[in-house]
Amino acid sequence: MNDNNENTAQQTDEDEFSVRESVDLTPDNADFFESEGGLVSMRLRTEAGEEYFERIVAVRAFPVTDPSEFICIRQPDIPGQDKGAEIGMIRRLSDFDERSRGLIEGELHRRYFSPRITSIIKIRNKMGYLYWDVDTDAGKVNFMVKDPSSNIRILEDGRVQVRDVNGSCYRIDDPKALGRSSYKKIEMYL
Amino acid sequence: MKMLCNMPQGAAAAFERAAGGESLRYCVPFDLYEDRVADGYIACTDRHIYKIVADEVVKIYDLSRMSAFSVETMHGSCGFYARDGSVAVLICRFASRRYVSAYYKLAAACDELAAARRPPEFRDSPDEYCPKCGRQYIPHTSICPFCSSAGTSFRRLWSLAKGMRWRMVLFPALAAMAAVALRFAIPAVQKIAINRYIYPPDGVQRGMIDKFLVLFAAVLFIELAQRVMSALCEWVGTRTGNFYAQRLRDALFDKIQQLSMASVSKKSSGSIIGRINRDVRIISRFMAVDLPHYISQIFSFLLALVLLLYISPRMCLFVFIPLPIAAFCIFISRKKLSALYRRVWTLEIRADDTLQDAFNGIRVVKSYGQEDRMIDAYGRKSETFTAFTERSHKFQDTVFPLIGFIVRLGSYFITMFGYAWLFRGTLDLGTLNQFSSYSGIIYEPLTLVSVIPRTIAQFAASAAKVAEILEEVPEVTDSADPADIKIKGDVRLEHVTFGYDSFNPVLKDVSLDVSAGEMIGIVGLSGSGKTTLINLIMRLYDPDSGRVFIDGVDVRDISQRSLRSQMGVVLQQTHLFSGSVRDNIRYAKPDADDEQIVRAARIANAHDFIMRLPEGYNTIVGDRGYTLSGGERQRIAIARAVIHDPAVLILDEATSALDTETEKLIQDSISRLVAGRTTFAIAHRLSTLRNADRLIVIDRGRIAECGTHAQLLAARGLYYKFVMVQYRALIEKD
């Protein structure tokens, strides 16, 4: 297996409790490229030398308020063994060129699946559970919302987040812009 | 979820074409493809994985080259990943959590298949989705809110009313009907009085006054009887309503005590208390007050209708002209009104949340000087709430009088035409009076039309929440014929595997043999499964596979009562119940006498500080009582365990929250408590475990090391590292 860098492997052997040091990732020390499997690989240059990661995972620190800044690049978790360690953090995604940005945004997009509701077909209230039939940018979906007063969240800038019983998240950028008939259906829950 | 689901024809055909003769082993759906909602299937044979989307095979993976199958839960979706050679690949994505456990199983199976080993056998777990509409059940129940109507909830709650149904609904309804019937009698008697004695056709004659007085008395009597009936109906309704509420509350409380810790802690205690109180009130009110009332109103409507038609069919016309108009108005405004009510309710909750938050966090608010901001935040929310309350009231106050006016229009017509006919002589005064009284009655139930749907919806919502608790299946249940045994203290675990989510094991294949009287120290990083191990020994959960024995008997065959009554626990945080120190110490053994209590307190090193409390052992502690320090609480917990005299003792971080000084004090009392009992002690501070006969080190759900302190140190393994880290930390501090 040539994927994992030997550096970290040795470290783990040496001291069980040491944690990988996170670095600031900039276009100068980090290269992102598409892996053979269609995911994202990365090469990192530090004083200690060069490291290669066959697959990285991108996680947002502020997914709601700052989706394109403070992006944490991590190694994937190895099931039943290790939680993936943080490799570094990208302060601003816009520092990177278009190609790298596209790759990371693609990875982020895979991770943060939160369809934008474009119109509300129906909301039915059955025994205190709301059944939503909506059209989103990912297609038609229906979902179930429990306890609407705590699972429909209004952000400071007026955006609305709806969380269903499974923890999936749907967003509405501007409820009023959905059109009158859609707005009337959600107005009472806002 | 099935591991081998049925593909629709198109997808099955595509699979056949691509796979040739390979037999299908697993088939699991997925619902996301290229960021769009899609119908896809992962079909797995012994050699390949086929990814099928929209009736076409879009990708084939060769199992023999693959490894490291895994499921990653991401934000809003999950991914099924693997390694193809040295390359990480994303096999598929799915948004529905419905598939998660199936993919975890599939990942485990594929790992085996890829290594050309026999895949494990899976039981199909019960699907938590409604077979009728395909929508999700309320977790841990088989209730589909979408398919169940208010009727189903009603039947469910009705069954709880066994033995009191007659009193609760039928009697009040009958009494109310009787009251209604009596109400109808009054205008009928009045009619006789008017026609015969007040405006008699042949003029007033002697002796009439006596008969009139008799009629007058009759009216008075009927009026009185009607009031008595109404009062009786109310009285019985309230009484049985309370009785039913009590029964429901007891049932809920019973159930909550039975449910597993996980399920109870998931529901925050605030929401449970709120639920029990509010929902029970709504339900019992509906069953005992609203429902009989509605029944009697329907009866009253029908009776009035029949009587009106009987008296004068042509005048009925006037009654019915405004009826459709009023019904239409009610229908139109109902939707708008319920939306307004709902909005007001939502806003009220949002404002309440802010208020509650500010109160609970008052210390933080004050210490950071954020009062103004909190006032601001609450002010804004309360402002919108007030604005909407006003709006809804304005609407209400416009619509209801309007509807009232339309409804009353009928009465105006009746009076107008009634007098015309009266003058023409085609109608007598008594009949007119009777008729207009009845027409007043017939409109009354009409106003209910706007209230009933809301009450029923409210009832249904409360019923669903209550049913959600009542129907939850407890994770741990007694077997058919549980044994009560006297526990000696041998504990044995055989190949125990367990996870709070069955697809994500926390403990893996753990085996352990402890003989009576031994003290076992459990060491490991947080999240490694220490507390889980103890939960299994106490049987707060049942293992997914493997068995737990106590004195050679499977814990599943021991009654939970007998098992737990012989186990004692001292946790990191001790909960003191509201009550005296004395009550708290003898909590597990309410019949303990004062001598035993004092002896236990002495053993626990608690006697001394208890004597310094203002009222000694009778000092009230708990939420509203005297505040004890962490160390004092722990010592009370130990005294509680001493009096309980358990065969198996569990110390879960019992001294972690305390300073070293206090710990030493408590350590002392613990060592007295431990003597002669099987003890499991979890501790972060390794010095706490120096008395342990054996130490086990748990690492990522497995027992990594087991032995005495000296043996483990000599082995220079994980334990050695733990000790060194703590030792180093100590040295550095000094």
Image: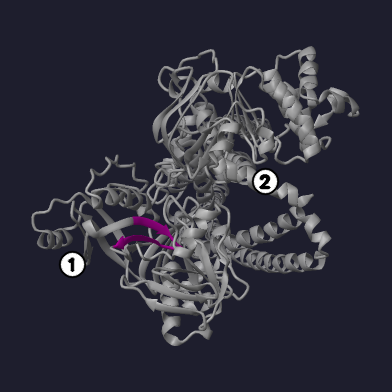
* Residue assigned mark 1: B56
Secondary structure category for the residue under label 2: helix
Q: Is residue B458 above or below residue B337?
A: above
Q: Is residue A71 visible?
A: no
Residue B621 lies, in percent from the top left, at 80, 32
Question: Who comes first in sequence, dot 1 or dot 2?
Answer: 1
Q: Position of residue B24 (x, y in %)?
A: 17, 51
Instruction: Name which residue lies at 47% across and 34% down.
Output: B474
Q: Is residue B117 visible?
A: yes
Chain under label 2?
A: B
Q: Residue at x 52, y 45 (%)?
A: B459
Q: Position of residue A19 (x, y in %)?
A: 57, 59
Residue type beneath disc 2: Gln
Q: Is residue B74 magenta?
A: yes
Q: Which residues are drawn in magenta?
A: B69-84
Q: Amino acid at mark 1?
A: Glu
Residue in the foreground of this view, choosing between B392 and B441:
B392
Residue under mark 1: which chain is it in? Answer: B
Prevalent SS, magenta region:
strand
Q: Which residue is mark 2?
A: B726
Q: Position of residue B649 (x, y in %)?
A: 61, 25
